[in-house]
């Protein structure tokens, strides 16, 4: 796969995913949640994964880290040359939270309610470094809280999660995620549960940490507004596949795939009066009921008969890579 | 922290924790007194619990508050000495049952799978029997003695805690903070110890407190039918048995009966208060 818009083509990617497939066993038969995803992530780069609920954006990342109990995962996800798919659980655990860490959507419920935040941050460090003393870990916890811009960190380390606001809790989650100096940080809708004003602060913090630590950031979101400011590249996912990928400004300026266009049109505008909120007609395809051919064709206004027959693959169209046979035909003319 | 000046005349009332208010305060005080009696009794015991003090079957009077029994021993003294048996026995039974139940329940709930199935079916089988009958059967087959009665009661009692803790662990295991602990790379042992158990043990704690009284009762029951402490030991159940043969000298059985009543009541009240104070939804504020 060629990499449009990658910051540097020569370097080896820190994370390299090829043909990742995830299938959940369900009572109605296997449900393919992710159906062959490829992407590369370079250090210092921010990649957004966008899509509706059920498009497989979170599942891709969770599968990579072995966090999906019963699902069948195939394909390849190499982190610094180490194959993560099928890796021994103990080795995978050593990578989770130290080399690759993750921030979850809801900071309200993702922290342990019975431990002070300082203890929780210390636990993350000591879980990966048994030689680290309690005192050293506690000191570093204060330092980390300072890094994530929590005021009075010496006092706050002794706070329990219920004593903190949502934004502060998400900062604590971020402090835990960067505690072991990870190379890749996966943020799964980190701002969804927060106030709009706090969202901006959190995104700013993530951006700052990315620069300071040369982190590779994967931002999973359905909020295109967040994507525009904070990331370099974007993968648009639909029904378990990447349907369009490219540099953020290219995708936003000239979206090629009809689904990407639809998503962008759905953004409410403040500069024009809208009578009706625009939406993409129909229901998102689910793994249990995948349409034939291009999974988006039943909702697509450009669809032609052949769309129901063949599922298109990613091809360079315009300035991005998109999986759409209609647009490929238009571009060829 | 900024100090807020209160208007003059406003008194700051520091409220006692819920388990130190009302009936539970009475319960805590009476349990405390029983414990003190049990610990210090040899220093100030009014009479010897095993030696006759004079006439047989004396009715309660100023000198012998609860009279004397068929062998002329002071019933009040013997009743107090009974606490030195019932309380330690209940303590050992409850603590051992909680430990065994916690380990089994935690392993069963957290790791699941075939181990869970096997352990829980064993729990089902044990709990299918009425506890008194099963404890009696086990003690009888081991031979009647205090030690065997304790062993039998532990065997009968731990499954309750195992099941209780398992149900909590299964629920807590699915919470998001546990998932995020997995994503952090915490080991299963660490997660179980620091992320699951602290949020799961409350019902076990509450039940264990209430059950303390139940075990006092069960101990007395076993002794009553001759399977626990044997005469002349001053054990409440055994003393009631002696009262049966002197049915019309009511004080012989009444004194240990009242003692059992007081202890069971106290622990029930304390258990209720603990449950109320842990149950955030139902806190009467």
Image (spheres, grey):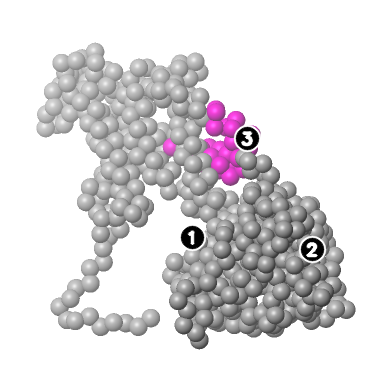
Q: Position of residue A146 (x, y in %)?
A: 57, 81
Of A229 and B122, nearer the camera is A229
Which picture quadrant has residue A303?
A: bottom right
Residue picked out by circle 2: A313
* Residue at image coords 45%, 24%: B128
3 or 2: mark nearer the eye:
2
The image shows residue A92, relative to residue B119, as above or below, that is: below
Crowdedness near tag 1: few (<14), some (14–19) or many (≥20) residues, C-alpha within 10 Å: some
Does residue B95 appear left or right of residue B8 in this picture? right
Which chain letter matches label 2? A
Residue B102 included in the magenta stretch of the image: yes
Give the CA separation, mark 3 to mark 2: 47 Å
1 or 2: mark nearer the eye:
2
Residue picked out by circle 3: B115
Q: Secondary structure at mark 3?
A: helix
Picture disc at residue A114: 1
Crowdedness near tag 2: few (<14), some (14–19) or many (≥20) residues, C-alpha within 10 Å: some
The image shows residue A123, relative to residue B92, as above or below, that is: below
> What are the residue bounds of the magenta stretch?
B94-122
Which picture quadrant has residue A25?
A: top right
Q: Position of residue B275 (x, y in %)?
A: 34, 47
Does residue A181 appear left or right of residue B46 in this picture? right
The image shows residue A192, relative to residue A208, as above or below, that is: above
* Residue at image coords 56%, 42%: B109
Of B176 and A141, nearer the camera is B176
Of B190 and A296, nearer the camera is A296
Residue A207 visible at all: yes
């Amino acid at each position: 796969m060629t990499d449009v818009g990658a910051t540097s083509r020569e370097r080896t990617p820190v994370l390299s995913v090829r043909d990742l497939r995830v299938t959940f066993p369900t009572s109605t038969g296997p449900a393919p949640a992710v159906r062959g995803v490829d992407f590369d992530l370079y250090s210092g780069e921010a990649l957004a994964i966008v899509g509706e609920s059920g498009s497989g954006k979170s599942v891709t990342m969770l599968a990579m880290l072995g966090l999906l109990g019963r699902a069948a995962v195939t394909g390849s996800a190499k982190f610094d040359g180490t194959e993560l798919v099928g890796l021994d659980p103990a080795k995978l655990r050593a990578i989770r939270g130290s080399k690759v860490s993750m921030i979850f959507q809801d900071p309200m419920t993702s922290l342990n309610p019975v431990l002070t935040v300082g203890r929780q941050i210390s636990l993350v460090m000591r879980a990966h470094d048994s030689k680290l003393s309690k005192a050293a870990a506690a000191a570093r916890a204060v330092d980390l809280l300072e890094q994530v811009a929590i005021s009075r960190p010496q006092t706050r380390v002794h706070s329990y999660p219920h004593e903190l606001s949502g934004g502060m809790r998400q900062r604590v989650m971020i402090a835990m995620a960067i505690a072991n100096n990870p190379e890749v940080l996966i943020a799964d809708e980190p701002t969804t549960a927060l106030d709009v004003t706090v969202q901006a602060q959190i995104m700013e913090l993530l951006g700052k940490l990315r620069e300071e630590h040369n982190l590779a950031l994967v931002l999973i979101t359905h909020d295109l507004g967040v994507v525009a400011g904070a990331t370099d590249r974007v993968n648009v996912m639909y029904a378990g596949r990447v349907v369009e990928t490219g540099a953020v400004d290219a995708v936003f300026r000239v979206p090629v795939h009809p689904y990407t266009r639809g998503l962008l049109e759905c953004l409410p505008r403040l500069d024009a009066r809208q009578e009706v909120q625009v939406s993409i007609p129909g229901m998102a395809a689910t793994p249990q009921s995948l349409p034939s051919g291009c999974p988006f064709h039943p909702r697509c206004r450009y669809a032609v008969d052949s769309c129901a027959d063949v599922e298109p693959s990613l091809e360079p169209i315009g300035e991005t890579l998109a999986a759409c046979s209609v647009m490929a035909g238009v571009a060829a003319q | 922290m900024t100090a807020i000046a209160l208007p003059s005349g406003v008194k700051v009332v520091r409220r006692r924790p819920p388990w130190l208010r009302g009936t539970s305060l009475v319960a805590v005080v009476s349990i405390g007194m029983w414990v003190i009696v049990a610990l210090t009794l040899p220093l100030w015991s009014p009479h010897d619990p095993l030696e006759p003090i004079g006439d047989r079957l004396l009715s309660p009077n100023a000198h012998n508050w609860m009279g004397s029994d068929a062998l002329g021993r002071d019933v009040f003294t013997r009743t107090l000495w009974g606490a030195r048996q019932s309380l330690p026995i209940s303590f050992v039974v409850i603590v051992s049952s909680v430990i065994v139940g916690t380990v089994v329940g935690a392993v069963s709930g957290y790791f699941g799978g075939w181990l869970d199935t096997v352990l829980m079916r064993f729990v089902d089988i044990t709990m299918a029997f009425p506890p008194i009958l099963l404890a009696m059967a086990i003690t009888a087959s081991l031979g009647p003695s205090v030690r065997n009665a304790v062993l039998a009661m532990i065997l009968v009692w731990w499954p309750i805690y195992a099941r209780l803790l398992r149900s909590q662990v299964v629920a807590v295991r699915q919470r998001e903070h546990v998932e995020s602990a997995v994503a952090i790379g915490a080991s299963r042992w660490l997660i179980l110890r620091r992320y699951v158990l602290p949020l799961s043990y409350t019902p076990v704690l509450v039940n264990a407190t209430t059950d303390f009284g139940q075990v006092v009762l069960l101990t007395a029951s076993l002794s009553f039918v001759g399977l626990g402490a044997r005469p002349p030991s001053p054990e409440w159940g055994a003393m009631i048995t002696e009262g049966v043969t002197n049915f019309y000298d009511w004080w012989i059985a009444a004194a240990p009966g009242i003692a059992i009543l007081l202890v069971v009541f106290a622990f029930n009240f304390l258990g209720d208060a603990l449950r109320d104070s842990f149950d955030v939804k139902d806190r009467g504020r």
